[in-house]
Image (cartoon, helix red, strand yellow):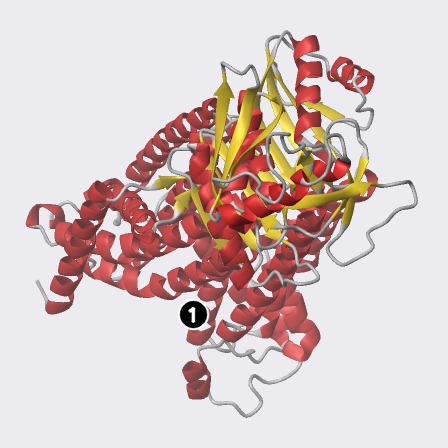
Amino acid sequence: MKRPARVRALFALAVIALSVFVAVTVPVRLGLDLRGGTQIVLETRSTETVKADAEATDRTLEVLRGRVDALGVAEPSIVRSGDDRIIVELPGVQDPRKAADVLGRTAQLSVHPVLGTATGSDKAQKEGERVLPDEQSGERLRLAAAALTGQDVKDAEARFDQQGGAGWHVTVDFKDDKGWAKLTGEAACHPAGDPQRRVAIVLDGKIISSPQVDPSVACNTGITGGSTQITGSFTSDDSKELALLVKGGALPVPVETVEQRTVGPTLGAEAIEASAWAAVVGTALTALFIIVVYRLMGVLATLALLCYGLISYAGLAALGATLTLPGLAGFVLAIGMAVDANVLVFERAREEYGKRNRPSGRSALTAGFKGAFSAIADSNVTTLIAAVLLFLLASGPVKGFGVTLGIGVIASMISALVITRVLAEFAVARRWVHRRPKFTGLASIGRVRTYLTRRDPQLMRRPRRWLAVSAVVLVVAGAGIVVRGLNFGVEFTGGRLIEYSTGETVDPDRAREALADAGFPQAVVQSSGDDKLTVRIEELTNAEAVEVADAIAEVGGGAEKVRDELIGPSLGDELRRNALIALGLALGAQLLYLAFRFRWMFGTGAVAALAHDVVILAGIFAWLGKPIDGVFLAALLTVIGYSVNDSVVVFDRIRELWRKDGKAPLAQVTNQAILQTVPRTVNTGIGVIFILAALALLGGDSLTDFALALLIGMLVGTYSSVLTASPLAVVLDAYSGGGKGGRGRGRSRSGRAKSGAAERPDRTEAAARAR
């Protein structure tokens, strides 16, 4: 074994050993959409005195951490996102009302002397004075400046008075008993029944208790011990929540809930099981197909794919990434994409085997890895661009998808270029394999290549015809956007979407009437299965959500909430803006990269094909009435990466052929490149179809739209990369004068080779022949 081969083998063993260790010792953290629970995103707001910067948000986070701990949730997570957002994850919490109310309350506690009652025209006279209605009759009281605040509170506890019959109340202990004694002592100097004998306890600008000081308390002596009781018509939950807020302290700045997601544990378990089955079935079918086509090399590629899965899982665990539902789908999808690198190598090895006078599996395999390297590198870089954009610009589950996709791309390169190569080189070096060349799967060029070689179709003879076909499909699909419009999800529009599982099948019109009778005529109701309904309303509080659930339960024979998403208007605008930025940057980044690696006309053709794919996919979803949400965005950016993969493979072959024959017309070279890469396109496409079909059929409702978008995008992207991007590059080259002048105009062939970009060949009669 030569030294490079030994280095690759040692590196592969080290990576696999490290991956096994990480996979066994470090568990992957599941997102709430897989294990069930509630996620709340809070945004801090500036006040007249305090700016909601990173420092204020950190102080707010610490107060919230105390409140979350007091809720008794197992394994909660609370982290700062940016300068003004806090993400709170509460596993197992299915009713977000209590959590959202507790976390969102500012809890500004203050205790005030009462100056007397207020008339209708009375207002605060001095700084710190307030006029507020009391908690019982609504009588308006004039309050002096606060004598005590929440910072003076030592402890608060909810208690039940069985003997006195006062029921549930909250006992508050102050740090310094002198302040409480002074406040109550001054109030005791006023006669019984006088409003000034009362002490007002205010929480978040509302009087929650304003008791009179007991007649037994002496003037200027007050209540000693620094303790008091807040009484009222409290239930057990009310008193515990109030004690929690008082004890936890006030938030430094107000917060607003901008996003809230709740997923039932059943839906999470179903998603995991469905995705697992999709992964097993899809991978098994893909592996079987690869083995049938490439025989021994297919078996080794399957082993490398298993190693790829191990490396990807270990990468997620090592980075501490959260595996979300779209991320899990991206993990499964990347298995199909990992097949592409192996197929590229094996197809190049088959070509090299047929070219040699005295072929051998070892020499063909070495040439195959060498010839396929640039295409593999370029195609994976374009996919990484999409993954990075998702990570930087997206949020929540879609961001997790970007992390998973990025790890999958890196793992697939290690799997194909290192592990597959080590296994394949070891196998073809065996004597019994050398004596049976057909067993390797490299000695035959395959049925697709044999058919194309025999027929030799001239696809680029009339490139404008293919562009006309693409234009027709584009207009038909794009008409859906104009005629039916895009059904933006709550992530992009703001609002609330709740999905219920009902006891019996409910007609959406009947549910819509029930909600209108309950006071929600603006509700949009859709059926998402035989026993599932989704309700979408622009503005809906947690209390109103209970009324909606009751209305659905009444007509549906019971209703169980399986999903609940709340997106604030500001966050919806931000997500929509970021989505457009992500698409724009993706197209721009692809254009710059392809223009750098190839020529401007190839980059322009590829980006035009990408825009073509985006419009067609969005148009088909518009015709079908499918939602345009964050998951669709993840699928769309993945389609962009996949479409560029196909374009890069064709362009890489054009560049290679043009270097060998610089005087050949571009149409002829492009036609030859397409025919040579079609076997790879077909075999990779079939492998990916197996994965996506398994996701669509077995992945459950939550993954169906995702898989459908990817399946449509893959088919459209494969077509456009071959029969849109390539013909457009040929037409652009002709318009730029490629058919009328000499090549390079002064540039040498050696200079072209150094730049790595294909130069325009000299074409006169060749260009006419191509037309």
Task: Judge by depth and name the residue closer to the eye, 572 or 406.
Answer: 572
Please tell me whether residue 620 is drawn above or below residue 6 in the rendered image. Answer: above
Q: Amino acid at mark 1?
A: Glu
Q: Is residue 307 left or right of residue 514?
A: left
Task: Judge by depth and name the residue closer to the eye, 67 or 585.
Answer: 67
Q: Within 10 angstroms of label 1, few (less than 14), some, or many (20 or more) residues?
A: some
> What residue is rendered at 68% in x and 59% in y?
47
Task: Judge by depth and name the residue closer to the eye, 197 or 570.
Answer: 197
Residue 386 pos. (x, y %): 51, 57
Mark 1 lies on a secondary structure that is helix
Residue 11 pos. (x, y %): 17, 60
Residue 727 pos. (x, y %): 62, 60
> What residue is rendered at 46% in x and 33% in y?
71
Residue at mark 1: 656
> What residue is rendered at 68% in x and 34% in y?
210
Q: Is residue 705 visible?
A: yes
Q: Is residue 190 left or right of residue 181?
A: right
Q: Is residue 607 left or right of residue 281?
A: right
| Quarter of the figure that contains the C terminus | bottom right
Please tell me whether residue 58 is drawn above or below residue 177 in the rendered image. Answer: below
> What residue is rendered at 32% in x and 42% in y?
28
| Quarter of the figure that contains the N terminus | bottom left
Residue 558 pos. (x, y %): 61, 10
Find residue 742 and report its image quarter: bottom right
